[in-house]
Structure formats: structure tokens, C-alpha cells
Image (cartoon, grey):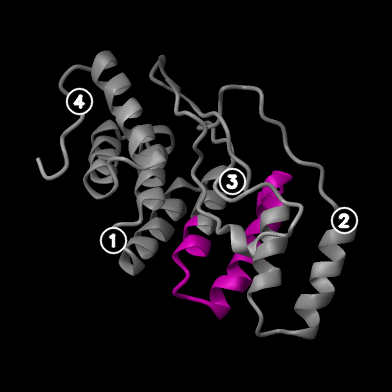
């Protein structure tokens, strides 16, 4: 997935750019050589910042990867690559199909699990997204990108500011110096400014 620039706005409040982080968690190793590096997609209803555009779907590359997938039905990698291409082209229903197939082959892959949840969010299924993120967190309770995504979906998909705050504070506890931690801190600070007593950052372990 590509990422860059998320603008948060809820209840008339603009959270501001979350410095180029989306709710994705692709591993670069699973990407086709020509794809944009992992972890680079724009989010909206979390997406914002407004200048990102869907990638043009390379049908030739998709068909080539589908041929590989058909020849090797137990290989998750081409399925993830196909899903990535569909995600970047904003064809989320197609991405859901292929992430689902990949996850059936590698059920413990937290990144694929979370990316599937992101697709549910983009197809207006916030509850299903949160269910998938919960499964991701069972695999890795400290997966910062999943926690960041939980906050985004709770804030923008469920209008649950308290739940978003809890998720973003969890990011700060597990990965305060990571890009996800920085994004969570900005979101919390903006939320706190707009809704005193709701947001606010906590130091790790606080």
C-alpha cells in the first residue's frame, strides 16, 4: 500500500496531517519490485491531506501474479502482491478477496490480517475492521500499526473518541519513538486541544 498524508477531521475538528501514515502494514518483502514501499497509503474518511491519488492498476502485472497463484495454490506471496496492487488502485473489494486468500494460507501473518481490516474500513465496514484488528492484536498485542488503525477506525468509523484515545495511547506505550507513535501523539494532541479532557498524551507506562 502506498501512504502519505492523512488528515483527521471529526465532529468538525481537523486533526491535521499525521505525517504520512496510513493504516496499512504491508511488508516491503511482499511487494512487487515496482510497487511503492510498504506502509505508504493515505487514509480517509481517514484519508486526507487531499493530494493522494489511486495508482493505476497494472492489469498485466495482476494477470501474471494470478498465473503464479494458480500454479502454486499454497503460496501466499503472489496473493498478497495482487491484493497490494488492488489496494493501491482503491479496488478494495478485490483486495479483500486476495488478502483473504493469503490469510487462509498464513493465518498468523499480522500484517496481512491488519491490511484486510483496513480494506473493511474503506468499504464502510468499521465493525468488521475492528474485529479483524482484534484478531491481529491476538497475534501481536504490541503491533503499533494495528493499534494506530484501531484508533483511526474508532475515531472516524465509530465516532468513539474515548476508544480512539485509548488505542493511540497504547501506541505511545509500545512504540513511542516510531512513526506510528509520532502519528498517535499528534492525533492525541489535536484531540485534546479540540476536546479538553478527552485526548492528551501519556508517557509510556503512565
Q: Which residue is mark 1?
A: 141
Mark with earlier residue (3, 1): 3
Outermost residue, left side: 206
Q: Position of residue 27 (x, y in %)?
A: 55, 59
Mark with earlier residue (4, 3): 3
Mark with earlier residue (4, 1): 1
Q: Residue at x 58, y 42 (%)?
A: 40
SS at mark 1?
loop
Mark with earlier residue (4, 2): 2
Left or right side of 11 for 88: right
Number of numbered discs overlaid on the protein picture = 4
Whether tag 4 and tag 2 are in contact, CB under 8 A, the answer is: no
Between 176 and 81, which is closer to the camera in this rendering? 176
Q: Residue at x 48, y 70 (%)?
A: 109
Mark with earlier residue (2, 1): 2
**In the image, which residues are magenta?**
86-114
Q: Nearer the viewer, mark 3 or mark 2?
A: 2
Left or right side of 127 for 68: right
The label shown at residue 198 is 4
Q: Nearer the viewer, mark 4 or mark 3?
A: 4
Q: Nearer the viewer, mark 4 or mark 2?
A: 2
Whether tag 3 and tag 2 are in contact, CB under 8 A, the answer is: no
SS at mark 4?
loop
Q: Which residue is mark 2?
A: 59
Amino acid at each position: 500500500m502506498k501512504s502519505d498524508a492523512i488528515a483527521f477531521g471529526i465532529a468538525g475538528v481537523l486533526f491535521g496531517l499525521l505525517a504520512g501514515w496510513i493504516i496499512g502494514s504491508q511488508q516491503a518483502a511482499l511487494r512487487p519490485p515496482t510497487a511503492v514501499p510498504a506502509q505508504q497509503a493515505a487514509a480517509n474518511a481517514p484519508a486526507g491531506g487531499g493530494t493522494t491519488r489511486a495508482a493505476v492498476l497494472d492489469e498485466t502485472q495482476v494477470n501474471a501474479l494470478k498465473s503464479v497463484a494458480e500454479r502454486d495454490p499454497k503460496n501466499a506471496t503472489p496473493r498478497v502482491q495482487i491484493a497490494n496492487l488492488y489496494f493501491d488502485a482503491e479496488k478494495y473489494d478485490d483486495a479483500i478477496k486476495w488478502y483473504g486468500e493469503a490469510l487462509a494460507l498464513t493465518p498468523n501473518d499480522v500484517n496481512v490480517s491488519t491490511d484486510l481490516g483496513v480494506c473493511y474500513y474503506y468499504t464502510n465496514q468499521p465493525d468488521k475492521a475492528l474485529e479483524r484488528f482484534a484478531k491481529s492484536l491476538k497475534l501481536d498485542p504490541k503491533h503499533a500499526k494495528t493499534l494506530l488503525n484501531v484508533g483511526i477506525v474508532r475515531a472516524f468509523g465509530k465516532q468513539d473518541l474515548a476508544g480512539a484515545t485509548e488505542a493511540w495511547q497504547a501506541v505511545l506505550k509500545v512504540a513511542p519513538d516510531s512513526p506510528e507513535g509520532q502519528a498517535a501523539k499528534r492525533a492525541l494532541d489535536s484531540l485534546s486541544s479540540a476536546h479538553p479532557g478527552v485526548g492528551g498524551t501519556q508517557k509510556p507506562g503512565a
